[in-house]
Amino acid sequence: MRMLINSPETVVADALRGMAAAHPELQVDVERRVVVRRDARAGGRVGLVSGGGSGHEPLHGGFVGYGMLSAACPGEVFTSPVPDQMLRAATAVDAGQGVLFVVKNYTGDVLNFEMAAELAEEEGLRIERVLVNDDVAVPGSPAERRGTGATLFVEKIAGAAAEEGAPLERVAALARRVAESSRSFGVALSACTTPAKGSPTFDLPDGELELGIGIHGEPGRERRPMMPAREIARLAVDAVLAEPAEAGPADGPVLALVNGMGATPLLELYGFHAEVAAVLAERGVPVARALVGNYVTSLDMAGCSVTLCRADEELLRLWDAPVQTPALRWGR
């Protein structure tokens, strides 16, 4: 195993120490595992808290800052944070206007954020929760879909609304609309390797790719021989468009995210985005805004995911609003 780590047991703590050293605008509690905006309570705005297992960086800690999250709770690698972390984060960012929890649809995250919400409400905080479940690769009802790339869209747009001073109910409603308007599909060219295991999470022979993978090292729903990027893009886009959004316009422009899974260089991701854009043009789907890069990753997995969000003028305005975080920044 060749990794830039000291030991599997300290990898998360070491990363948080590095984040603290690199970003003095954040308060990073390494021991209690909470990352908070230093100005989180300024201006009396709604607080936004998210979190999940480490290994998906820059999600979530990299999105803490102006115009996005107020705080993030990192768990161990691919392991949910605990309710005490979430309660600590909510208390740290509450400015009297309430707190929104952004929760990816995984059992541990859902249960722990639910418990944290109950504890926070017992202490007098107002809490709303939004569930992100955008992964169309999971068969069955929408309640069974995993939360993946749409988490970035939810955190950015809800964060912009909170920055403008929108009340908790409005911020939560916008976050839900974004989640319900978004769909994702992921592809792996290699499995990821967790520090604790030290070997790939699943076996993927040379010359094959995995369709419909998750962000925790889960194998996909189908394995096929390797194919050109244009064919992979067509499969991914068609899978996303086959699952109509539950909210937002039935047609019209989309926000498009081509997200690297951690080990795929931008040279390949931009080439893949060109193919995604071409397929969307064939399907009559205009791309209003596009984002390309590694944002919701799975350690060192090679591959990418495609996320589309049906967006009206209000969502596009909030997407364009200034943001300044370690991993996402523009307009300020």
Image: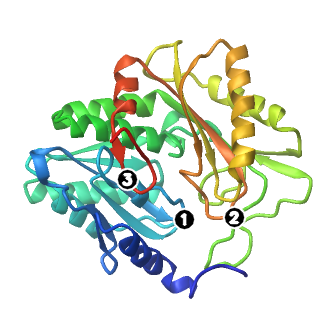
Under mark 2, the amino acid is: Cys
The local secondary structure at tag 2 comes to loop
Expressed as whole percent of the image width and height from the top left, the position of residue 174 reads 31, 30
In the picture, the quarter occupied by the N terminus is: bottom right
**Marks 2 and 1: CB-CB under 8 Å?**
yes
**In the displayed structure, would residue 216 be above or below residue 329?**
below
Nearest the camera: 90 or 41? 41
Give the residue displayed 43% in from the left and 34% down from the top.
Answer: 179
Expressed as whole percent of the image width and height from the top left, the position of residue 190 reads 77, 58
Q: Disc 2 versus disc 1: distance between alpha carbons?
A: 10 Å
Under mark 3, the amino acid is: Thr
In the picture of the structure, the residue carrying the numbered disc 3 is 325
> Is residue 11 shown left or right of residue 281?
left
Residue reaching furthest to the bottom = 6
Under mark 1, the amino acid is: Gly
In the picture of the structure, the residue carrying the numbered disc 2 is 192
Give the residue displayed 43% in from the left and 69% down from the top.
Answer: 75
In the picture of the structure, the residue carrying the numbered disc 1 is 55
In primary-sequence order, the first of circles 3 and 2 is 2
In primary-sequence order, the first of circles 3 and 1 is 1
The local secondary structure at tag 1 comes to loop
Q: Disc 3 versus disc 2: distance between alpha carbons?
A: 26 Å
Q: Residues within 10 Å of mark 3 (few under 14, many from 20)?
A: many
Give the residue displayed 46% in from the left and 27% down from the top.
Answer: 181
**Marks 3 and 2: CB-CB under 8 Å?**
no
> Is residue 265 shown left or right of residue 63?
right
